[in-house]
Amino acid sequence: MADKFENGNIVVHGWLESISNALVSCLLFMQVMRMMGLNNSVHWMAWFLTTFTQMSITMAILTVMLKFGGVLMYSNAFIIFLVLEVFSVATIAFS
């Protein structure tokens, strides 16, 4: 039981790390792109792609941990990844 709880803590801390990195990069990108004279739409598209890439890497690692860590061993790995990707897109849209 303790092993699954420790895996959960690792997952939560990994998720929080990716969210905090996304927020810091958003502010940095906005300042740099405004100095370059680019449009706001270019900023938001670049921010979405950067954040989506970071979260996709996190979701891939989380999928492997859930599938082969014994938590969701009878589930399809692609379906797990797809659900987590939809969740990350929703998280990006709300942030």
Image: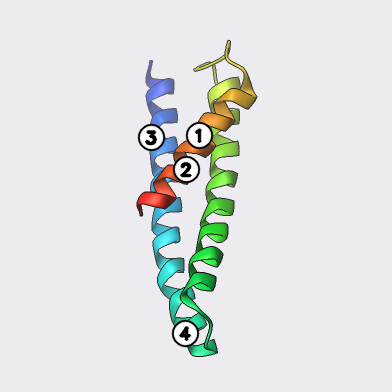
- CA distance for labels 3 and 4: 38 Å
- The residue under label 1 is 84
In this view, which residue lies farthest toward the top? 74
- At 51% from the left edge and 56% from the top edge, which residue is drawn? 51
**Image location of residue 84, percent across then percent down:** 50, 34
- Residue 88 disc label: 2
Residue 56 vs residue 69, the one in the foreground:
56
- CA distance for labels 2 and 3: 19 Å
- At 38% from the left edge and 20% from the top edge, which residue is drawn? 2
- CA distance for labels 3 and 1: 17 Å
- CA distance for labels 2 and 1: 6 Å
> Does the CB distance between marks 3 and 4 fall below 8 Å?
no
- At 58% from the left edge and 31% from the top edge, which residue is drawn? 81
- How many other residues sit within 10 Å of disc 4, few (<14), some (14-19) or many (≥20)? few
* Secondary structure of the residue carrying numbered label 4: helix
Q: Between disc 3 and disc 4, whose residue precedes?
A: 3
Judged left or right of residue 76, residue 17 is left
Identify the amino acid type marked 4: Arg
- Residue 34 disc label: 4
